[in-house]
Amino acid sequence: MIGLIAHAEKPEAAGVVLEMVSELERNALPFLLHKNTAPLAGMASDLDETALAERCKLLVVIGGDGTILRVVQRIKSRLPVVFGINIGTLGFLTCLGSSEIRRAAECIAKADYALSQRALLKAVLTKASGDASTLYALNDVVVSRGERSQLVQMRVTLGGVPLTDYNADGLVVATPTGSTAYSLSAGGPILMPDSGGFVITPICPHVLTNRSVVISDSSVVEIQVAKPGQVAFVSVDAQSWFPMSGSDSLRLEKSERILPLAMLPERPFTEVLRRKLKWTGSNI
């Protein structure tokens, strides 16, 4: 069974969904639609992201990288294969563009795609009261100063051993998938999807020697606000936001959850990098 989820607010979404439904029917592929996607095709559904994930082996996500991030955030059960179709230019996480719907349906029908196993971060924010919130990030977990102009001071340990105190606008802890997002904008390195690491990148650090650090994905990262009275804000894939004070702690480690992301054999990650970052030439 195939699940179909679209970014329903995008103007082009309805046309792409109708075309995708037509191609799935033409290929005799059984499918279910998300509750917000079904009306675009003149249908009805009461299924949310988790319900689709429980009933489908593959989810076709129409929108962009942000749409895939939202879908992963909202799935509370196992993660099925995600096959992304971008409305617009090619994304880092999507397989094909909206003009390639027939090709997408054929790839799905023949299982003509490779699976890139994408690691997720498990984030546990424990408050002074003992209450804890657990979330999962495909891209990154960011601790930032929010709208305040004052820098935030963050103490970071790896496996219980002190790393350093960062005095900065914020701190990004990214997966390889997220290394091409906010971390890259903040000056961090690009990690290949199968590199087996995470990256810690400070945002506009006060001390110029504070640079990105690549760590093993078996590392446990703990972050606390080091300056008394300060409040920072924790965001997970830019979807969920939580305040964090000096009496709270944030623990980050590799999740047991893995996202099987569909990629076309002729469009490996290196090709996506070349297209998105406009790299050219045979000898770069």
Image (cartoon, grey):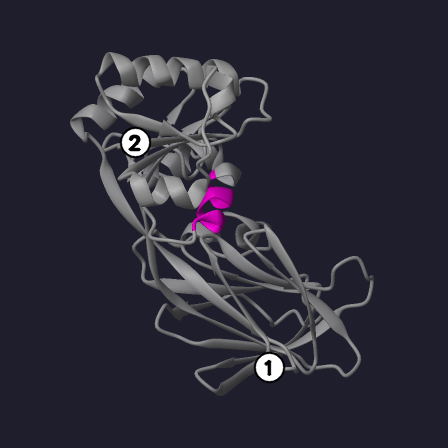
Residue in the foreground of this view, choosing between 64 and 48: 48
> Which mark, by number, is residue 130?
1
Kindly give the residue lying farthest to the bottom in the view shown.
161
Q: Is residue 47 left or right of residue 181?
A: left
The correct choice, above or below, for 4 with respect to 166 in the image is above
Residue in the foreground of this view, choosing between 198 and 42: 42
Residue visible at 45% across and 19% down in the picture = 43
The correct choice, above or below, for 234 with respect to 106 in the image is below
Instruction: Tell me the magenta residue range.
Output: 68-75
Residue visible at 81% across and 62% down in the picture = 148
Q: Is residue 1 left or right of residue 41?
A: left
Q: Amino acid at mark 1?
A: Gly
Residue 72 x/y as whole percent: 44, 47
Q: Is residue 118 left or right of residue 232?
A: left
- Looking at the rendering, in which quadrant would you find the C terminus? top left
| Other-residue count near label 1 (Cα within 10 Å), few / some / many at <14 / 14–19 / ≥20 | few
